[in-house]
C-alpha cells in the first residue's frame, strides 16, 4: 500500500530534550516536506527536500533540522524543543513536477 | 511574501444546498494553486491542481476554478460526507528556484447537515 508513515504519532516531552520524528514513504518520491499545523495559523511549511542531500527552508524553519540521506526517509529533528513547538506535524511527499502531495497521519507533539 | 486567505472560515450547509469557498492569493508569480481536503485527525488529501487563469477541474460534486487573484471551490448538491476542512495552497514560480515552497491558507471548515 502506498503510504507516508510517521513515528511517533504522539509524543510528550520536556523542554530541551532532543527528539526526532521519523517520516518514511514507499512511493519512490523525490520531494518530501514537513509542515506544522496550529489552530488559527493553518499549515506552515518547515523544511522541504527536492531529493537526496538537497534540503531547503520553508516559512518556519527556526528550531528545526532535517536530513535527507536516503530517498525514502526525511526525519525532523528538534535539537532543543521549546513549548512554542507544541503542534501537530505532518510529513508529505510527491514526485517532483507533480504537486499531488501525499500526507502522513500526523504527529502530535507536546513540549512541557 | 506569498499570502493565501480563505473565506469563509466556516460554512454550514443543508444537504443539497450548493455553495462556493473562496481562496484569495498574492504571489509574485503563480506556479500552481492546490486544493486539499482534511478530515478531523487526518492528514490533508489532494483534490486539484490549477496552473493558469481560466482553468477548471472537476471531481464528483466539486469544481475548482482559477482567476488571476483567486480560486473558488464550488460544491454542488453537497452530502454530509463532504463535511471537512478544505485547504488552499499556492506555489510561487520563483524563477526555477524554491520550487518546493508551498503556502497554505487557514482553511474553510465545511459542515453539511442531512
Image (cartoon, coloured by chain):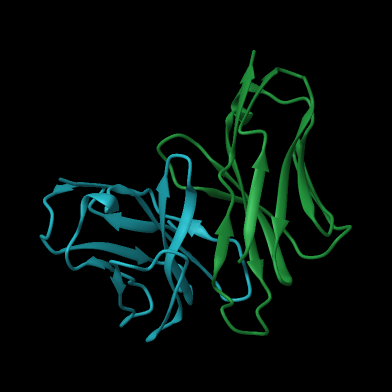
Chain colours: A cyan, B green
Quadrant location, the N terminus of chain B: bottom right
Horizontal relation, residue A32 to residue B21: left or right: left
Q: Quadrant of residue B106?
A: top right
Quadrant location, the C terminus of chain B: top right
Q: Quadrant of residue B16?
A: top right
Q: Nearer the viewer, residue A24 or A59?
A: A59
Who's the residue at 73% across and 68% down the image?
B30
Horizontal relation, residue A91 to residue A30: left or right: left
Residue sticking out furthest to the right: B54
- Count of numbered labels shown in the rendering: 0
Q: Position of residue A16 (x, y in %)?
A: 12, 60
Relative vertical location of residue A108 with respect to residue A95 in this rendering, above or below: above
Q: Position of residue B67 (x, y in %)?
A: 84, 55
Horizontal relation, residue B71 to residue B93: left or right: right
Q: Position of residue A36 (x, y in %)?
A: 39, 54
Relative vertical location of residue A41 with respect to residue B76 in this rendering, above or below: below
Q: Nearer the viewer, residue B49 or B72?
A: B72
Relative vertical location of residue A77 with respect to residue A41 in this rendering, above or below: below
Q: Nearer the viewer, residue A39 or B49?
A: A39
Q: Quadrant of residue B13?
A: top right
Q: Position of residue A13 (x, y in %)?
A: 13, 50
Horizontal relation, residue A72 to residue B24: left or right: left
Who's the residue at 71% across and 71% down the image?
B28
Amino acid at each position: 500500500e502506498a503510504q507516508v508513515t510517521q513515528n511517533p504519532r504522539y509524543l510528550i516531552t520536556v523542554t530541551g530534550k532532543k527528539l526526532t520524528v521519523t517520516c518514511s514513504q514507499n512511493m519512490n518520491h523525490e520531494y518530501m516536506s514537513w509542515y506544522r499545523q496550529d489552530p488559527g495559523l493553518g499549515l506552515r511549511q518547515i523544511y522541504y527536500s527536492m531529493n537526496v542531500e538537497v534540503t531547503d527552508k520553508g516559512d518556519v524553519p527556526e528550531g528545526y533540522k532535517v536530513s535527507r540521506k536516503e530517498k525514502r526517509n526525511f526525519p525532523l529533528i528538534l535539537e532543543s524543543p521549546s513549548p512554542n513547538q507544541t503542534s501537530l506535524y505532518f510529513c508529505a511527499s510527491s514526485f517532483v513536477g507533480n504537486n499531488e502531495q501525499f500526507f502522513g497521519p500526523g504527529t502530535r507533539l507536546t513540549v512541557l | 511574501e506569498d499570502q493565501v486567505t480563505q473565506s469563509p472560515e466556516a460554512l454550514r450547509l443543508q444537504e443539497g444546498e450548493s455553495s462556493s469557498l473562496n481562496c484569495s492569493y498574492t504571489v509574485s508569480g503563480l506556479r500552481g494553486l492546490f486544493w486539499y481536503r482534511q478530515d478531523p485527525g487526518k492528514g490533508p488529501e489532494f483534490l486539484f491542481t490549477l496552473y493558469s487563469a481560466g482553468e477548471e477541474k472537476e471531481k464528483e460534486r466539486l469544481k475548482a476554478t482559477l482567476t488571476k487573484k483567486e480560486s473558488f471551490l464550488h460544491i454542488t448538491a453537497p452530502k454530509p460526507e463532504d463535511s471537512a476542512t478544505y485547504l488552499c495552497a499556492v506555489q510561487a514560480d520563483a524563477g526555477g528556484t524554491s520550487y518546493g515552497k508551498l503556502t497554505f491558507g487557514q482553511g474553510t471548515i465545511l459542515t453539511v447537515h442531512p
